[in-house]
């Protein structure tokens, strides 16, 4: 082996050893530096939206995309952490348990960098009301100011007010959105419905159906579907309770099993499990009889939100 | 230059006029040919220096984003591909414009090839313009190939035709004109300064060029008259590069207004002419002995 080859070999070995050392040190840091990482993970963002916009020069669009993906990952990470700590169970309608304190700031920076980024406002409209309804209203009003012709943002703002049970405001927002060019015709009807029966289940169902139809986002559709499933299940349970009351009136006692209750369940719109004779909820899991067969509830394994 | 040496004494005024006109035509033709030759050589040199290798990095970036961004963006991959593609086009272009632009004159003086060129019947202004056009050609190739890359990425992400594949081109034209200004700035600085300092100054001009609206605000809100005049002067003297930013709007499918594009292009042409004239004035006075 020539001296030059020896030097080359030595350098190659050194390179491999040092690279392995760097990888090892990095892995050690990953495993042992969680406390400090977690301590700072929830600190407020270094940059406000306005500062970020000034600093990004002509690259504000790509910076907005970056903050958008950070927002999605922030929520995603929180869900994964929650599932790890709670045996893999997470309800999409229980976002308040996730402690998403940075989400409003992240979405604010995203939309300041790119005020026309409609999906970011829509995402905020669906997630933020569970975390901070006031911040959700601020975000949507900001979106409407930057995109005054977007009827979808009015729809989402109306949804937030509806969730807050402020039906008068929701009605006003829908009415304002309905006047925009290209706004869907149902917004006028929704404005009237909010005023007349804002708190009804029928209004809720229409609200979610419209959200489902107007959104292009798969995760939004999935979330709305969960809400619709819950409403369907509430309707199911109302009907089943009515039938169980009929049974009691007819036989003087509550049914001991679904097979016994079959006589009153026949001819209803409910889906019946062919194996056990139990009606099934919208996620396909059979309901269970509770309170000695006088009442009905969702099964533990049901995917329908409670 | 010999074509211009004409003995007018034995000819009538009309004959002289005709000869002068044809002589000017030949002179312009020769001048144009020389400038094009310099531009062509500058382009070849850039290719030899592997400047266009940045296209490989760009291609990898686009392929990566087109394949993986969909996983992270919740349905916003089209917007992100356009944002990322056009921003990378501008960023890479600015780096090329600055780092190659500042070396245009410096390299020729260092290698002493400038003396050979200037000993020929080529003016210093012609040399500068030729160098400038050569780098512009490099940037044009770069921008067009990158534009086609963004188009291809869009078609891949959409699995078919997307209207954005066409509507990105006005934004690309504006990016190209922004790069023309940055190149002219780099050339101006390189005509009297070292490459490192020229690169630094050019980069500062690029940054300030995107804050020009703040200078206007300062000019409008200044408390004293001299302050207002100072900022107003700076506002008009420095390039308004934000006029050429249409990336974000394009990513939303909004094509810039035709009048705004035309205005920006006219502004760009005037501003480049100013910078090249200034570079010519400085370069004429440089002593190469």
Image (tube, helix red, strand yellow):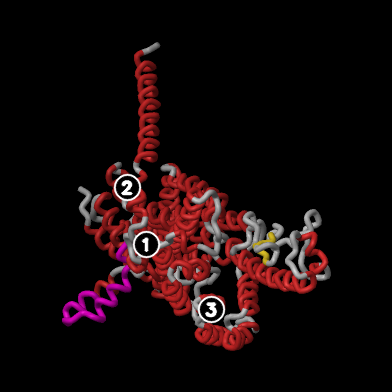
**Residues drawn in magenta:** B206-232
- Of mark 1 and mark 2, the one earlier in the sequence is 2
- Give me the chain letter of mark 3: A
Q: CA distance from mark 3 to mark 1?
A: 37 Å
Label 3 neighbourhood size at 10 Å, few (<14), some (14-19), many (20+)?
many
- Residue B5 as seen in the image, left or right of residue B18: left
Instruction: State the SS at label 2.
Output: helix
Quadrant assignment, res A227: bottom right
The residue located at (45%, 47%) in the rendering is B54
- Of mark 3 and mark 1, the one earlier in the sequence is 1
- Residue A168 as seen in the image, left or right of residue B159: left
Q: For residue B136: magenta?
A: no
Instruction: State the SS at label 1.
Output: loop
Residues beneath discs 1 and 2 located on the same chain: yes
Q: CA distance from mark 2 to mark 3?
A: 40 Å
Examine the rendered structure and indicate whether residue A6 appears above or below residue B126: above
The numbered mark at residue A298 is none
Q: What residue did someone put label 2 on? A: A36
Instruction: Pick whichever, B263 or B3, lies toward us.
Output: B263
Identify the image quadrant of the N terminus of chain A. Answer: top left
Q: What residue did someone put label 3 on? A: A162
Label 2 neighbourhood size at 10 Å, few (<14), some (14-19), many (20+)?
few
Can I make out residue A90 in this image?
Answer: yes
Q: For residue B222: magenta?
A: yes
Residue extending furthest toward the top: A1
Examine the rendered structure and indicate whether residue A251 appears above or below residue A75: below
Residue extending furthest toward the front: A252
The residue located at (62%, 64%) in the rendering is A226
Identify the image quadrant of the C terminus of chain A. Answer: bottom right
Residue A301 in the image, given as x and y percentages of width and height: 64, 54
Residue B105 in the image, given as x and y percentages of width and height: 31, 51
């Amino acid at each position: 082996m020539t001296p030059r080859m020896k030097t080359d070999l030595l350098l190659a070995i050194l390179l491999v050893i040092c690279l392995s050392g760097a990888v090892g040190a990095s892995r050690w840091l990953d495993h042992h530096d969680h406390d400090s990482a977690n301590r700072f993970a929830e600190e407020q963002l270094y940059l406000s939206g306005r500062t970020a916009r000034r600093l990004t020069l002509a690259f504000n669009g790509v910076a907005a995309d970056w903050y958008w993906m950070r927002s999605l990952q922030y929520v995603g990470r929180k869900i994964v952490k929650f599932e790890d700590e709670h045996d893999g169970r997470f309800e999409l309608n229980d976002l308040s348990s996730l402690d998403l304190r940075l989400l409003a700031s992240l979405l604010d920076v995203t939309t300041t960098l790119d005020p026309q980024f409609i999906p970011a406002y829509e995402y905020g409209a669906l997630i933020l009301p569970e975390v901070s309804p006031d911040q959700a209203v601020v975000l949507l009003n900001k979106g409407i100011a930057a995109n005054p012709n977007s009827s979808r943002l009015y729809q989402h703002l109306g949804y937030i007010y509806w969730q807050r049970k402020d039906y008068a405001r929701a009605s006003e927002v829908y009415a304002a959105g309905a006047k925009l060019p290209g706004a869907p015709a149902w917004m006028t009807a929704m404005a009237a419905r909010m005023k007349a029966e804002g708190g009804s289940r029928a209004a809720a169902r229409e609200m979610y159906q419209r959200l489902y139809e107007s959104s292009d986002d798969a995760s939004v559709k999935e979330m709305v579907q969960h809400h619709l499933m819950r409403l369907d299940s509430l309707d199911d349970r109302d009907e089943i309770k009515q039938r169980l009351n009929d049974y009691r009136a007819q036989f003087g006692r509550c049914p001991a099993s679904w097979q016994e209750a079959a006589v009153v369940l026949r001819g209803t719109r409910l889906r019946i499990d062919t194996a056990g004779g139990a009606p099934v909820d919208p996620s396909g899991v059979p309901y269970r009889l509770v309170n000695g067969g006088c009442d009905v509830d969702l099964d533990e394994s049901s995917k329908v939100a409670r | 230059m010999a074509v211009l040496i004409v003995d007018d004494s034995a000819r009538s005024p009309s004959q002289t006029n005709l000869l002068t006109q044809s002589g000017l035509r030949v002179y312009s033709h020769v001048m144009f040919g020389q400038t094009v030759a310099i531009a062509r050589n500058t382009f070849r040199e850039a290719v030899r220096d592997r400047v266009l290798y940045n296209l490989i990095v760009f291609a990898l970036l686009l392929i990566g984003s087109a394949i993986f961004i969909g996983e992270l963006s919740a349905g916003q991959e089209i917007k992100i591909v356009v944002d990322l593609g056009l921003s990378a086009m501008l960023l890479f272009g600015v780096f090329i414009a600055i780092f190659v632009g500042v070396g245009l004159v410096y390299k020729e003086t260092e290698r002493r090839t400038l003396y050979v060129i200037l000993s020929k019947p080529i003016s210093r202004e012609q040399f500068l313009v030729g160098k400038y056009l050569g780098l512009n050609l490099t940037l044009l190739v770069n921008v067009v190939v990158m534009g086609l890359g963004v188009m291809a990425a869009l078609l891949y992400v959409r699995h078919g035709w997307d209207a954005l594949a066409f509507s990105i081109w006005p934004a690309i034209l504006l990016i190209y004109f922004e790069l023309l200004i940055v190149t002219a700035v780099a050339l101006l600085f390189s005509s009297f300064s070292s490459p490192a300092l020229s690169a630094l100054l050019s980069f500062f001009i690029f940054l300030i060029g995107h804050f020009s609206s703040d200078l206007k605000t300062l000019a409008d809100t200044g408390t004293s008259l001299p302050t207002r005049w100072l900022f107003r002067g700076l506002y008009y003297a420095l390039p308004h590069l934000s006029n050429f930013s249409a990336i974000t709007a394009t990513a939303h499918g909004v094509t810039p207004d035709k009048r705004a594009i035309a205005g920006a292009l006219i502004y760009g042409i005037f501003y480049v002419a100013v910078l090249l004239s200034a570079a010519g004035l400085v370069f004429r006075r440089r002593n190469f002995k």
